[in-house]
Image (cartoon, rainbow, N blue to C red):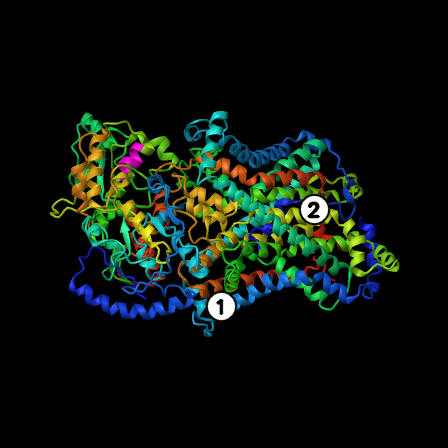
Amino acid sequence: MSSQATHARRSQAPARRALGPARAGHGFVAAYTVLLIAFGIVPTGYAVYFAFTNAGGRFTGLSNFSTALDDFRFGPAVGHVAFYLLCWLVSLVVFVVGLALLLHRMAAGGVSRVLRFLYYVPGALAGAASVMVWLFVLDPTVSPAAFLLRGLGYHTFGQVIAPGHLPILFTLVAFWTGAGGWIVVMYGALNNISPDVLEAARIDGAGAWQTAWRIQIPLLRKWIVYMVILAFAGGTQLFVEPQLLSQASVGVAGRDYSLNQLAYDFAFQNNDVNTAAAISVELLLVGLVVAGVFVARSGFFDAD
Amino acid sequence: MQTDVLRSAAAAAPRLGLRPGAGGAARPRRTGRLRRNPLPALVLALFAVFFVLPVLWLLLAATKTDDQLVHANPLSFGSWHALRVNWDALTAYQGDAIFQWLGNSAVYASIALAITLCVAVPAGYALAMTEFRGRRTLLVATLVVMLMPNATLVVPLFLEINAVHLIGSMWSIILPYAFYPFGVYLTYIYFSTALPRELLDAARLDGCSEFGVFRRVALPLAAPVVALVGFFSFVANWTNYYLPYVMLPQSNQFPVQVGLGTLLDSVPQFNPTAGSLEVQRPELALATLLAITPVLIVFLFAQRFLVSGMLAGATKD
Amino acid sequence: MTVKWRVVGAKTTGRTRRRAGFLAAGGALLLAATAACGGGTGGGSSQGGFHPVKQTGGSLTVWVDSTRLAAAKLYQKQNPSVKMDIVTYDGDANGSNYLRTKVSLFNRTRKGWPDVVFSSQNNEATWAVQDGFTAPLNKGLIPSSTLAGWAKGANDPCTVNGTLYCLRNDLSQTVLWYDAPLMKQWGYQVPKTWEEYQAIGRKVASEHPGYLVGSAGDPWTPEVYMWAGKCGANQITGPKAAKVDTAGPNCTRMASLLDGLIKNKTMSLSSVFSSDFDKNEADKVLMMPGPSWFGGSVFQGTFKTPAHRIAAAPMPQWSGDTAASTGNVGGGTWLLSAHSTNLKAAAAFLTWATTADDYQGKLAPGYPAYAPAAKTWLAQQASSGYYSGDITGTLQAAADQIWPGWGYGQFSQEAVWAATVTPKLTAGKTVTSLLPAWKDAIVNYARADGYQVTQ
């Protein structure tokens, strides 16, 4: 099960069209299609419907969008999510690729495997659990890294969670849970680069830097893009981290921080599902455009 | 519609035997140059500390009293007695609510997992191995939905579920969990790359029906991808917060992730009006440990047999 | 369908009453829209015409925060025949809006409402009435002879157009807590005015650095200092009208007082419940303005201050001010669900929880709003031997001095302060420089909740 199979099959791809009776195909995908419609397409349609109507169900044009846009929390929330995404994606690319390259170089079998495992274990703490842990790690009075926080001049939890720090802190949490998995993936991708290529580079006198920069990273490009797009989709969903932080900091940080929180507040606290839907539609649109461009342009995902 | 699907997917990094390209043979050589330079080792070690330290702290925190948590060395061991006390206090919270939440999580995650597998595997197979009208549309829709930030659909999903009067029922989260386009995509990639068409043709010549081909030929070969999809789906379902937070009004229906939020609210340091010191911080740490145990077990288990599943996303050059 | 109607303190005069009628008409229109989008919320409990659902009995679902859990548990113990389902939640602390969010969900599912809820917030009636969640209590559910026992004005936050929609749990009048032996040892007089208070702060800074005269790190900081200092930041002038003025002299002088003390480090910027306060500052409290429940909850419970140290004095006043004023931090309210299928049992529990000596008098951490229970409570405090000297007179007097110019809007002042002011104070800004930003935030949140705001 490897490249041979892929290539073998690829060569007969045209023939495949004739195979596989249509009725059977429909039978196999029927259940999935139902779910796709029920939980992918209908909610999207529902969101669009609500976004363009008022509470009475009358068409209102863009007024819900302008309500959302005019809300004093909207602009900051967009800024928060955008800045967080920037931090998260940049740190992901730089550190994941860097660490994978280092691990690959260092690869003294056992050590590398142990390190990769250690890096990836926090992934098990995704979601609320990661917030619970970081609430303590970021509190100088109980933190195991207290000396570091104090060294940076932060003596209280309040100083650590100053509003300007939040994108960095959320990035830290997301990186902590998410990066290990990607490091393992990148490591695997590096292993797929033929040793002959690296050997050739070495003979040509390329140093570690040059090999990484000229050969390994270009060959990793595809996976880096893949990682960025999945991380982008994940990053726009910021909800549980600010929500729990807001609870834990008695409202000092994280309230109405992200767009999802704002939509939630509109829907359930202001009883204004229409504006909430408008925010969802805006987010969906961005997500859709990014996803669409990616699927259509990158040629990365195989949709024949 | 899982909030953290993609992030957990990334976090999970399974390794399935569908290794593209040159396979895992390449074992890079150490260069003498690097050995002399201690910097890379230092960086790797520092990151290891970054990733491990919080986990270690969490393990130790559960063994302390609240007082020790604040005043003792953060990385010291408390006592077995304190662990015992914390355990008793935690399990006494609202009459073993923690077990109910864990049970809820288990029920939601596993029913959704079962549906996901029953739905996604045939769908991925059909997309990869058969031709039918609408196939390409379905594939593109799957890709787009998979890449869409799906937490944004939670509020509309709430409205939809509300319209069919399912709010407050466990199906309000199980069914959305069960819709797992990423799983379909992985299965699709797996079958496209790993299942030789000749096998299917041979089976057809032997008189197998289309379903027979799927059951006799494709399914037995699908074990790795079933494990892979199951792993992702389970982790995503277990760690989801937003969807159950919105859909389930009753606290006895919460999965453990939302339950953790409730516990957090009962810790006086985080909610000053919780004056009677009902839940102390070490109990919260213990609850967090309990909440992640199933995922951690799956992680450890997964490491043994899954090989580079994420790389499957880019098998076609 | 009724209207949110909450005039705080302003002893409801003829003028406001007329306005109430006018506003009620306008509000009804507004609410028609809300009800439409609420998916059939409300409907049930229009004021005066409360129609209980079919009384089928069943178990009594009670939501309490963890402090009030003791009340529910004790009731269960004393009344084993009542089937109770006790659930703890965050008590809506710091304006978390948990209750409102859940009620809005239940309104959609048409089931799941708790029968009785405790909330640590006093402003729940502002939405709970319009959402059709609360049952009117003074229309037969609870005898008026019982209701007459509440301290004067205590149930104002619960009253909408003369109908009572919740019951106040405790009064959280603020007083000046202080360490009596330490004050004596250092030769300080308990301050009667804010000016004296400030002067002591200066002295402490130079003579005993590290000691504190207060904390401004909690979300209720504005309620302790700004409310008691008569700052007009939160004037609720009608059901959907508010006046916000943070530039008045009372606001600015309180701000600069706080700034001076923060600067000389006698005013902490950590929450009194935070780990760092507990670790570094809990044994360094000389004085601390705070609500009545600080005594048991903060000093005895959290700080574990030894007995015979803590005493209570009246809040300082502005010098030259004749009418004494004090602030109020929470107090909490009990709500009874209009959807209860067990109104009788629910009302019985509600009455017990708010009035029973066994709980309010002997167990409750805060000063009971129900006057007869308050007597027992005060006696209990006096005999507990924890405090240095008698604190009952101070608390009793303060209960009647809560400044009426600060209202209960639907938006949470605590949440606004926590999000807007606290982080910037931590970052080194001054309260004075933040007054305009504070005002803007209040105005924004008030408008987001549909308030007409004058500034």
Q: Nearer the viewer, residue C334 or C400?
A: C334
Q: What residue is drawn where x is 49% and y is 36%?
A: B285
Q: What residue is drawn where x is 53% and y is 32%?
A: B59
Q: Nearer the viewer, residue C376 or C60?
A: C60
Q: Which residues are magenta?
A: C293-300
Q: What residue is drawn where x is 37% and y is 56%?
A: C340
Q: Can you say whether C176 is above or below C411 in the image?
A: above
C51 drawn magenta: no
Quick one: quadrant of the C terminus of chain C? bottom left
C295 drawn magenta: yes
| Amino acid at the residue labelled 2 | Ala
Tell me the chain of label 1: A
Residue under circle 2? B227
Residue under circle 1? A50
Residue A93 visible in image: no
Tell me the chain of label 2: B
Q: Whole-percent x and y of residue A140?
A: 43, 35
In-image side of B188 versus B11 (left or right): right
Q: Which mark is residue B13?
A: none
* Circle 1 crowding by C-alpha within 10 Å: few under 14, some 14–19, many from 20: many
Q: Can you say whether A62 is above or below A186 in the image?
A: below
Q: Quadrant of residue C396?
A: top left
